Image: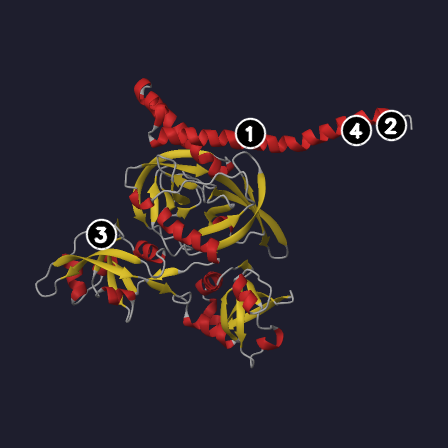
C-alpha cells in the first residue's frame, strides 16, 4: 500500500507522455496542412494577378526574378496535389510466379480521395500504394479503368488532401508555357517546364484506341506517367502519358527526346467522372468510317474521292463511309466530306477525331467544320455541321468470331458488374462482368450458376464488358501475330467467381 502515493504522479507523467506521442503525428500533420494551405493561397494571389503581392513583384523586382517567383508559386500551388503511385503485381514465369514492383505518378481529383493516373501505371496490379507530397503513405484501391484511353481512377482514404485545380484544355494554344509534374526515374515530386509544341497529336500507340495528345517539350521521362501537366496558373490541362524516345520512330518508355505527350483534360473530365459514378465509361458514337488523306492520295480514286484527292489542300480526315441511321447521317455528313476541325480543334488523324467523339457523352453535341467537294465543277465549299452523338456499344469494334465464341459456350447475357446489378441478381458485388443469363443447354450451365462474375481474362483483372473485350483481343494478339490461329484452336482463359465465392477457370475456344 505504501507504493500507491508515489505511483500516482508516475502514471500521470506516463499518460501525459503517451498522449503527447500519440498526438504529435496529428499535430505535425495539421501544421503541414496549414502550411500547405498558406502556400497555396499565396501562390494563387501571385498567379491570378491580384493583391499587393503581385504589384510588388511587378514594380520592384527584375523580370527574371518575376519569372522565378512565378515558377515557385506554381510549384507550391501544384505539388500538394501530386502523388507517387507504387504498384505490386505478380509476374508469371515458366515455372514460378515472381513479385514485380513498378511506379508512376498521379494527382488528387477531389477531397474524397480519388486519384487520377494512367491505366498502364496500375493495370494488373495486386496492390496499390500512394505517397503524398509530405511523404505519407496510404493504401489505394482501383475504382475504374478505361484501357482504350489509358485513364484510371484509384482511391485512398480522405482527409489531409489538396485537390488539384482543373483547367480547360480547349483554351490552350501552341506556344503556351506548361509544367509537367511527377516522379521521373523515381525522382519523386519533380517539376519541369516547356511549351505546348503541338495539339491533336496521334502517336500510333498500340494499346490506346483514342489519341488526341498535347505535345510538349517539357521534360517527361519514365515515372512521369500519370502526373499532371499544368498551365501557367497551375491548372491541370492534361496528364503525362507517353514520350518519343528518339529510338527510330518509337514512342513509349525511354530517354527524354524533347517530345512528351499528354492526354487533354477534355478527354479526362468525362472519363474520370463516369468511372467514379458508374465504374464504366459510356462513349460517344458518330457513325462514320474515316481514311487519311495520305492513304487516299496514294491510291487511284473515282468520283467524289478523286475530287478530294486532287482539290483539297490542307489537313483533315476523309469520311469514307456514313453508317445508315447514324448520328452522322442525321447531321448531314456525306461520303467524301473532309473533317478539318471538331469542337474548334483542328484534326489531322482518325484517332484525334475518334477521341473527341468518344469523350463526348451520348446525347451531347459535337461541332464540325468540313470541306465538301463539288463534283460538278471541281473545288469545294466549307460547311459547319453539328451532330448529336449516340452511344458506342462495347462490342462495336469486336470481331464477330469473339462474340460468337462467348455465345457458343453459353454466355448469353452479361453486363458490367455494379452494386445495383448484383443486388438485382441477389448476389455479392464483385468488380468484373456479371453473367445474367447462361444457356441451360450448355456445358457451362452445369458448373457455373447465373450471377457469377468474370473477374479476369488471360489472368488480367477486368471491371467492365469493354475491358473484357479489350483484354481478350490483346491476349489473343501474340498468337494471331505468330500465325498460330491458322494451325491451332485459340483459347480464352476466363477467371470466374461464383456467388458463393468459388473461383473457377473457364476455357472459351475460338474456331
Residue 31: image tag = 1
Indicate which label's residue lies in the foreground, 3 or 4.
4
Q: Split into 4 quadrants, where in the image is the N terminus? A: top right
Earlier along the polypeptide chain: callout 1 or callout 3?
1
Please name the residue shown 65% across and 32% down the image: 23
Residue 11: image tag = 4
Q: Which residue is mark 2?
A: 4
Indicate which label's residue lies in the foreground, 2 or 3.
2
Q: Quadrant of residue 72?
A: top left
Q: Which residue is mark 3?
A: 315
Earlier along the polypeptide chain: callout 4 or callout 2?
2
Q: Nearer the viewer, residue 52 or 472?
A: 52
| Residue 307, position as x, y percentages in the image | 15, 62
* Picture layout, residue 491 above or below residue 185: below
Disc 2 crowd, CA 10 A, few/some/many (<14, 14-19, 20+): few
Find the distance from the CA under tag 1 to the CA under tag 2. Answer: 39 Å
| Residue 49, position as x, y percentages in the image | 33, 29
Amino acid at each position: 500500500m505504501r507504493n500507491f502515493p508515489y505511483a500516482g504522479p508516475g502514471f500521470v507523467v506516463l499518460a501525459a507522455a503517451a498522449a503527447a506521442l500519440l498526438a504529435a503525428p496529428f499535430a505535425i500533420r495539421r501544421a503541414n496542412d496549414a502550411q500547405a494551405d498558406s502556400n497555396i493561397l499565396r501562390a494563387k494571389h501571385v498567379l491570378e494577378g491580384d493583391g499587393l503581392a503581385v504589384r510588388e513583384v511587378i514594380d520592384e523586382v527584375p523580370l527574371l526574378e518575376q519569372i522565378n517567383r512565378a515558377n515557385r508559386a506554381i510549384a507550391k500551388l501544384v505539388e500538394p496535389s501530386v502523388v507517387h503511385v507504387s504498384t505490386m503485381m505478380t509476374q508469371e514465369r515458366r515455372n514460378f510466379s515472381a513479385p514485380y514492383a513498378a511506379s508512376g505518378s498521379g494527382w488528387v481529383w477531389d477531397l474524397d480521395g480519388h486519384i487520377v493516373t494512367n491505366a498502364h501505371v496500375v493495370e494488373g496490379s495486386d496492390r496499390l500504394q500512394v505517397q503524398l507530397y509530405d511523404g505519407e503513405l496510404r493504401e489505394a484501391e482501383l475504382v475504374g479503368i478505361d484501357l482504350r484511353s489509358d485513364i484510371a481512377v484509384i482511391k485512398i482514404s480522405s482527409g489531409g488532401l489538396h485537390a488539384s485545380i482543373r483547367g480547360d484544355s480547349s483554351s490552350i494554344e501552341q506556344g503556351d508555357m506548361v509544367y509537367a509534374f511527377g516522379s521521373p526515374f523515381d525522382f519523386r515530386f519533380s517539376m519541369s517546364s516547356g511549351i505546348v509544341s503541338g495539339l491533336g497529336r496521334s502517336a500510333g500507340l498500340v494499346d490506346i484506341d483514342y489519341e488526341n495528345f498535347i505535345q510538349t517539350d517539357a521534360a517527361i521521362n519514365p515515372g512521369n506517367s500519370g502526373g499532371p501537366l499544368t498551365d501557367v496558373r497551375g491548372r491541370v490541362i492534361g496528364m503525362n502519358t507517353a514520350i518519343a524516345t528518339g529510338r527510330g520512330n518509337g514512342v513509349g518508355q525511354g530517354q527524354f527526346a524533347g517530345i512528351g505527350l499528354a492526354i487533354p483534360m477534355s478527354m479526362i473530365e468525362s472519363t474520370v467522372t463516369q468511372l467514379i459514378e458508374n465504374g464504366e465509361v459510356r462513349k460517344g458514337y458518330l457513325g462514320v468510317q474515316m481514311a487519311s488523306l495520305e492513304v487516299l492520295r496514294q491510291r487511284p480514286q473515282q468520283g467524289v474521292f478523286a475530287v478530294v484527292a486532287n482539290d483539297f489542300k490542307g489537313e483533315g480526315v476523309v469520311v469514307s463511309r456514313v453508317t445508315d441511321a447514324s448520328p452522322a447521317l442525321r447531321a448531314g455528313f456525306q461520303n467524301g466530306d473532309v473533317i478539318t476541325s471538331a469542337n474548334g480543334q483542328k484534326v489531322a488523324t482518325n484517332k484525334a477525331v475518334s477521341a473527341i467523339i468518344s469523350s463526348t457523352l451520348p446525347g451531347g453535341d459535337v461541332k464540325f467544320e468540313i470541306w465538301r467537294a463539288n463534283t460538278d465543277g471541281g473545288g469545294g465549299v466549307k460547311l459547319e455541321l453539328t451532330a448529336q452523338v449516340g452511344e458506342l456499344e462495347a462490342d462495336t469494334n469486336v470481331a464477330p468470331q469473339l462474340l460468337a465464341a462467348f455465345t457458343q459456350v453459353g454466355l448469353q447475357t452479361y453486363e458490367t458488374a455494379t452494386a445495383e446489378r448484383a443486388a438485382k441478381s441477389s448476389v455479392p458485388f464483385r468488380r468484373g462482368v456479371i453473367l445474367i443469363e447462361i444457356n441451360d443447354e450448355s456445358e457451362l450451365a452445369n458448373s457455373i450458376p447465373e450471377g457469377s462474375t468474370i473477374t479476369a481474362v488471360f489472368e488480367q483483372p477486368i471491371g467492365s464488358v469493354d475491358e473484357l473485350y479489350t483484354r481478350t483481343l490483346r491476349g489473343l494478339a501474340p498468337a494471331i501475330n505468330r500465325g498460330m490461329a491458322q494451325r491451332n484452336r485459340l483459347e480464352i482463359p476466363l477467371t470466374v467467381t461464383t456467388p458463393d465465392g468459388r473461383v473457377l477457370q473457364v476455357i472459351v475456344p475460338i474456331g
